Image (spheres, rainbow, N blue to C red):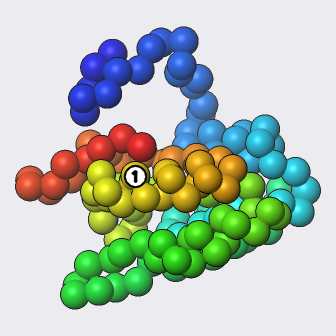
Amino acid sequence: MHRHEWEVGECEILRAPNVLNGLATAVAAFTGDGDGIIVQPPVFFDFYDFIKENNRELALTPLFLKDGRYEMDFDGLRQLAEDPKNKMLFLCNPHNPVGRVWSAQDLKQLGEICHETGVVVVSDEIHGDITFPGHTYIPF
């Protein structure tokens, strides 16, 4: 399978009925009761509900608007990632609802922070094929 200059083997694919079920399964598999899940609002509202319904805590690092474009708060992200209770980060790539297609540098910086702190990244990439011309979607 080749797409977006990214190769994924069939054995690496696990089917889920929908994205939210996939995210909820990852929460159950990689976190425990009371663990924090980092979320970058504004984001799809169902994220909040199933995090709370699974006895996990929300750890919010909001995106901020700069010159008409949403940006990640990498300092805030690092601070939350360094807290040992926060075990996972939900990434929207591209971001829903703000429509931001993250750059390679954005994804690299996020990945480095999470790798250094042991935070598992679960990336919702369902909107990867919906980008405006001139913007390149890069799978995380």
For the point 23% across and 85% down, which residue is it? 68
For the point 26% across and 78% down, which residue is it? 69
Screen quadrant of the N terminus: top left
The answer to whether residue 107 is seen in the rendering is: yes
Residue 75 x %, y %: 52, 77
Q: What is the residue that sits farthest to the left in this orientation?
A: 134
In terms of image quadrants, where is residue 107? bottom left
In terms of image quadrants, where is residue 76? bottom right
Please count the marks in the image: 1
Of residues 100 and 72, the one nearer the viewer is: 72
Residue 54 x %, y %: 83, 56
Q: Is residue 106 above or below residue 11?
A: below
Screen quadrant of the C terminus: top left
Is residue 38 found left or right of 129 in the rendered image? Answer: right
What residue is shown with label 1?
Answer: 108
Residue 110 x %, y %: 48, 58
For the point 70% across and 66% down, which residue is it? 82
The answer to whether residue 42 is seen in the rendering is: no
For the point 40% across and 52% down, which residue is it? 108
Is residue 47 found left or right of 57 in the rendered image? Answer: left
Of residues 52 and 112, the one nearer the viewer is: 112
Which structural element holds mark 1?
A: helix
Q: Is residue 71 above or below residue 96?
A: below
Residue 61 x %, y %: 57, 76
Q: Residues within 10 Å of mark 1 (few under 14, many from 20)?
A: few
Q: What is the residue that sits farthest to the front in this orientation?
A: 116
Name the kind of residue labelled 1 in the image.
Lys
Is residue 77 found left or right of 3 in the rendered image? Answer: right
